[in-house]
Amino acid sequence: MSDHSGTLAPRGVEHVEATLPLSLLCAVFVLSGFAALTYQVVWQRSLCAIYGVDIQSTTIVVTAFMLGLGLGSLAGGALSTSPRRQPVVWFGMIEIAIGIFGLCSLPLFRWIGGFTAGASRPATFAASFLLLLIPTALMGATLPLLTTHAVRRLRNVGRSVGMLYFVNTLGSAMASFVTAVYLLGQFGQSGTVVIAAATNALVGGSVLLAYLVARRAS
């Protein structure tokens, strides 16, 4: 079976009907990385306000982010192994789920902070750690899902991974600067989180809509 470029499609993905433009994949992954690092900056400040500014609070956020991204990457890789699944559809739904969690995150942090007030340090650590593990795992799943879609389109693993990793890191770097220098000062933590959640909704909605349009056209 040949695609429109005349190259052979890999075995097991002949049923794939819709592929998205690479420009769209890059654009949404820049925004995805932007939203993810926006959350990290805001959540770190929020947890520091609840539990205090110390090395332990910083360690919780950084460790949960790193572990969550790793676990999410494993889960996303497992999801993307089946040729019957559409990785971009999962990507879009996960982005929307991240946005929903983001909208609820600050009130949830405050509730957990009140609930664990007076608790032992390990209990506080565990509650905060597990709370951050959920959204970061979702974030970690996005790269393998989108990479799988790009590989099916480009037939080139190295180019697909390199391109998407670059644009995602670019968005994250932009968020680290813009959030600290502008967003938090202008909109506060709540407003900044709403902006990040709206970005996730834009990313997820755009991908799902583009997929439906491409599938109808194919």
Image: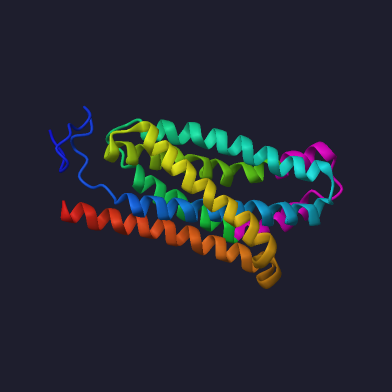
x, y percent for residue 206: 37, 59
Q: Is residue 141 above or below residue 172?
A: above
Lateral position of residue 201 relative to residue 39, left or right? left
**Residue drawn at the location 36% of the way across and 37% of the way down:** 148
x, y percent for residue 5: 17, 41
Which corner quadrant holds the N terminus?
Answer: top left
Q: How many marks?
A: 0
Taking depth in this image into account, of 175 and 61 the one nearest to the observer is 175
Q: Is residue 206 above or below residue 80?
A: below
Lateral position of residue 15 relative to residue 20, left or right? left
x, y percent for residue 211: 28, 53
**Residue drawn at the location 35% of the way across and 48% of the way down:** 89
Lateral position of residue 107 relative to residue 77, left or right? right
Q: Is residue 8 above or below residue 41?
A: above
Q: Give the magenta part as a residue range.
A: 104-128
Residue 70: quarter of image: top right
Lateral position of residue 36 relative to residue 118, left or right? left
Q: Does the magenta portion include 115? A: yes
Taking depth in this image into account, of 152 and 70 the one nearest to the observer is 152
Residue 188: quarter of image: bottom right
Taking depth in this image into account, of 174 and 146 the one nearest to the observer is 174
